[in-house]
Image (spheres, grey):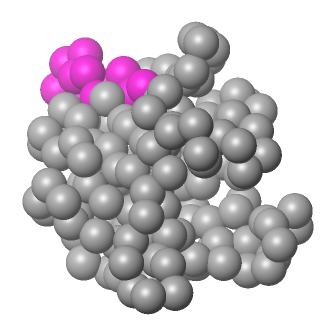
Amino acid sequence: MHTVAEENVSATLTVAVPAGRVFAVLADPATHAAIDGTGWVQESVDRAPLTEMGQIFRMDMYHADHPNGDYRVVNKVQVLDPPHAIGWLTGYEKGDGQLEFGGWIWRYDLAPLGPSETEVTLTYDWSAVPQFVRERGIQFPPFGPEHLTNSLHHLAELAGPTSRA
């Protein structure tokens, strides 16, 4: 199931995995390429688990429509409430080394439905994107809502009892 609101899109999936296990997979940047439903995330540059607010982690990306094809994003942890929620802002590193965030956030909310089942909601929210960023011609969301559903299915597979993650 997915929903589109005015400036966010979300999808929800119930997985047969405890919330703590799902959270652990999400808090490991090395799993993000395998979770990604768009296929844009290539590899985590920073491998440390996500453990604190404000933590920065980078991802190597690829998108055919990006001016460079290959590029790198910088993420900043904005939500960290184990095992209930985790989320990050996405941006980039400017030429002078300063970080700039575009105002969009990826957020996972986990609702335990018992000891071995979790309802997972993935939300992509662009409501805080400033006007100057919108004027750059970026379309929001830059993908169809099915990519969120794909991500949730990938997450369920990675967190499942037969996985090694």
Residues 13 and 59: in front is 59
Residues 64 and 11: in front is 64
Quadrant in which the C terminus appears: bottom left
Where is residue 134 shown, x and y percent of the image? 66, 40
Q: What stretch is highlighted in magenta?
A: 110-122
Would you place residue 119 above or below residue 159 in this image? above
The answer to whether residue 59 of the structure is visible from this angle is no
In the displayed structure, does residue 107 sit left or right of residue 113?
Answer: right
The answer to whether residue 33 of the structure is visible from this angle is yes
| 73 within the magenta span | no
Please give the count of numbered marks on the rendered protein: 0
Where is residue 129 shown, x and y percent of the image? 51, 38
Would you place residue 118 above or below residue 53 in this image? above
Residues 27 and 20: in front is 27
Secondary structure mainly formed by the magenta segment:
strand
Would you place residue 156 above or below residue 5 in this image? below
Displayed quadrant of residue 1: top right
In the displayed structure, does residue 142 sit left or right of residue 16?
Answer: right
What residue is shown at x 66% (from left), y 78% (from top)? 71
What residue is shown at x 19% (from left), y 32% (from top)? 84
Residues 102 and 5: in front is 102
Where is residue 139 shown, x and y percent of the image? 76, 39
Q: Which residue lies furthest to the right in this view?
A: 64
Would you place residue 94 above or below residue 37 in this image? below
Where is residue 160 shown, x and y percent of the image? 41, 47
In the displayed structure, does residue 161 sit left or right of residue 115?
Answer: right
| 117 within the magenta span | yes
What residue is shown at x 80% (from left), y 67% (from top)? 66
What residue is shown at x 87% (from left), y 62% (from top)? 65
